[in-house]
Amino acid sequence: MHKLLYICKKIEAMIKYPLHYQNEDDFENLVTLICKKILGEGVIPFAKGRDGGKDGRFTGTANSFPSENDPWKGKIIIQAKHTEKIQASCSDSDFNKIIGEEIDKIKNLKSKGEIDYYLLFTNRKLTGGADSKIVKRIKDETGIENTIIAEEKIQQYLIQFPDVVKMAGLNRLLMPLEFDDSDIREVVLVIKEALKSKGTSSQITDFSKIELTQKNKLNNLSENYFSCLIQSEFADFSRIDSFLSDPINEEAKEWYEDAISDLNAKIIIHRDKYDGFEEIIDDVYNKVISQNADTLKGNKRLVRTLLHYMYCKCDIGKKA
């Protein structure tokens, strides 16, 4: 029994949530949930907008931060800085600029008597050297005690507080669909010119006449998702169809077929891990974007369009 518990703890400790898949709002919500644990239920998050250097605040005596024996007491300002870059570090030059901007905001808060302590959360990596350097810089320039809670410490909190993981929906970030995203990327890059054309195309498939209602039920894709996001793209689907059917684009067609072959296999294997099919589409989209953020800059929308095309063409998902 003890050995089993030990193994479970080891497996749990190995889990690392890819926080770069979150958006800013989700990350701020996660930070609020963690702060309610380490500071107290009195944590007050702020609405989206010009935060003036604060995403939340807590006034009083912290539960256990920085320790139970010596907790912070006073006005604690909470700030969250999220990045979608996988390898982002607190040592990066852009973060140095962010710190400079935050220092100005802290000075302003101090002049108003609104801050005693400053707590900065970020999903960037943080080395010991960078930690002490940044904390010292903030203290020297503002006179405010501060701490940076970065990627490594956040992951520890997520192991310590499994209910936070559940409330923040972080298990959704552990995507079971691992596939080669390069084929989708290449297809998107070559079809973007075809989609810019608003002229007539040889409409190979009339997507409005396909029995998609039955397919949606079979794959558990919601009517709302289909009507709001997919139906409006039928004209783009026809242009993609025409492009991929042109013999001159044979190489792109091969990339496309490789992509759907890989995706379909993974979807079939892991289908029971998802509820609605739109969740699968969203996970695939997030994976492609996160791995190719710079390459696909300005073309992210086309990734989702291509995935919707695959679905409506019955190249992925169960066929009606």
Image (spheres, rainbow, N blue to C red):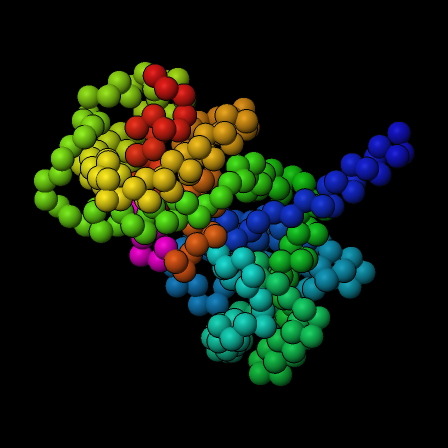
Residue 45 pos. (x, y %)? 51, 53
- The correct choice, above or below, for 152 with respect to 103 in the image is above
Give the residue at x 58% y 69%: 90
- 159 vs 280, left or right, is right
Given residues 211 and 149, the one toward you in this image is: 211
115 w.r.t. 239: above or below = below
**315 is higher (above) or lower (below) than 214:** below
Is residue 5 in sight in this rendering?
yes
The picture places residue 120, in percent across and down from the top left corner, at 58, 64
Which residue: 54% across, 28% down?
A: 270
| Between 149 and 5, the one nearer to me in the picture | 5
Q: Which residues are magenta?
A: 296-302
Who's the residue at 18% across and 30% down the image? 204
Residue 195 drawn at (x, y percent): 21, 46
Residue pictured at 48% horizontal, 72% vertical: 94
The quadrant in which residue 199 appears is top left
- How many marks the image carries: the answer is 0
The quadrant the C terminus occupies is top left
Q: Residue furthest right?
A: 2
Left or right relative to 82: residue 300: left
Quadrant where the N terminus is found in the figure: top right
Q: Is residue 80 visible?
A: no
Residue 301 in magenta stretch: yes
Q: Which residue is farthest left?
A: 200
User: Percent from the top left, x then y, of residue 211?
Assistant: 26, 18
Q: Is residue 232 magenta?
A: no
Residue pushed farthest bottom?
A: 140
Residue situated in front as seen by the camera: 112 or 158: 158
